[in-house]
Amino acid sequence: MASLNDLISGPFGWFFLGPWYDPLAHGAIVRLYLPMSRAWAEASMNSGTVAAGLKEKYVEADRRFTDAAFSEVGDLARSMAARAHAADVWMRARAQHWRAGARRTHPPVRLQLETTADVAARHGSRRENPDRAFLPTPVPIVRSRDLTLNHRSLSWLRYASAAADGGEAWARVDSPLNGRCDGTVVFLHGILMEREFFSGLYDYAPPFLSGANGAMRLIQPEGPWHGRRMRPGWYGGEPLLGNPVGGLLDYFGAHVIEIGRLIAWARRSYGGPVAIAGVSLGALTTQLLISVARTWPAEARPDAALLITTNGSMTEVAFEGSLARSLEFPAHLHTAGWDEAALEQYRPLLEPGELALSPESVMAVLGATDTVTPINGGERLVARWTLPSANVFRRSGGHFSAAFSLLRDFEPIERLKQAMQRPA
């Protein structure tokens, strides 16, 4: 089966990169994929269902893979392939629940919205001390043994989650097979994007691993509630959609700290420059990090950054973004007592302030018709941060097609590599 990379880089790539693709993708996600996912998440918790049986097989395959990866015992290649297959089969079993979307038997999101009082009780102290809300205190990070696959070297990282509910976080490391790297890029995924759980879906690694401006190692962490960090009974990323304010505060509060730790670890472990890049939700996380990092130790601050489909205003994303409107976020938020004045109190914990890097070290990719993270907010951010015009790449499509454009057009990635190698 052809991967998304093959399709986009091939002769029909124009279909995925044109403005007509985004309305189709948006509708399919809201009306079909999310309700299917909601039904699948429920079924995965109910003993005797197909989804629950496939989940059990995945859990066992993942245990065998983990044992092999973090010890010298076992066939790592075989256990990795078995885990990838079990994960893919389990994930794709949600297609069996197509009636959930077609017949509207399930909502797209399980709502557990917190009121303003609920959020204040949990995040009030962070709100009062925003400069200390994201400090990346170090934790042990354990690296697996290496595996050669698809002309690259793979390894995995495990470390303590910074989320309030604890647990363990993972990241995948893709390195050039010859071992020669000019730096490291920590790449943050978007919501619903679970690279380690779908086979042949998309792969952002190739243009980082080689190119005109050097080869970069790529570290891809799993964000809170995604992948191995999915909550039982929820699909990947759903807790954020189900609790847009409190969930976003939780997500940023944990993931920004975790990424700061990864940046510092990569600098100590590998040497060379370390950059950060993110798409959609990953870009919103990245822009917050390269603002709050101004108070961080130098080793945790990235040397450069790439924002792919972003918006500097979370209020605009929550109340005016097309995905938020389709999921009726504005009405749900108002019911729970949230308005722009209430959100304003949490702005330092959600939105970027002063840029901690030089503007020359920050790149942005914006979709001309992006309505998910509306482009006007992205344009305001790049203007406020005075990013050089050569660092801002405006693509003709919307949110999804602009993000996918990097699988065909590597110019923003090559520009990031150049910035990484620029003397501080």
Image (spheres, rainbow, N blue to C red):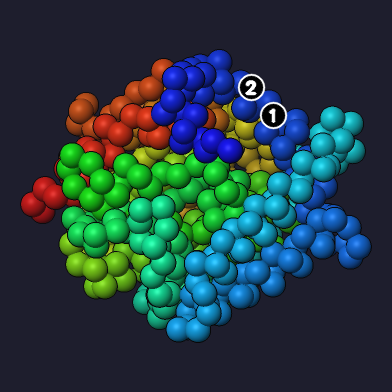
- Classify mark 1: residues with Cα within 10 Å, few (<14), some (14-19) or many (20+): few
Q: Quadrant of the N terminus?
A: top right
At mark 2, the secondary structure is helix
Q: Residue at x 46, y 23 (%)?
A: 13
- The residue at which mark 1 appears reads as 28
Q: In which quarter of the image is residue 107?
A: top right
Q: Are marks 2 and 1 in contact (CB under 8 Å)?
A: yes
Q: Position of residue 155 (x, y in %)?
A: 41, 67
Q: Residue at x 77, y 60 (%)?
A: 54
Q: Nearer the viewer, residue 35 or 313?
A: 35
Q: From the viewer's perspective, is residue 187 above or below residue 142?
A: above
Q: Is residue 416 above or below residue 395?
A: below
Which residue is at 84% across, 30% downward? 102
Q: Mark 2 points at which residue?
A: 24
* Residue 282 placement (x, y as % from top left): 46, 47
How busy is the neighbourhood of tag 2: few (under 14 within 10 Å), some, or many (20 plus)?
few
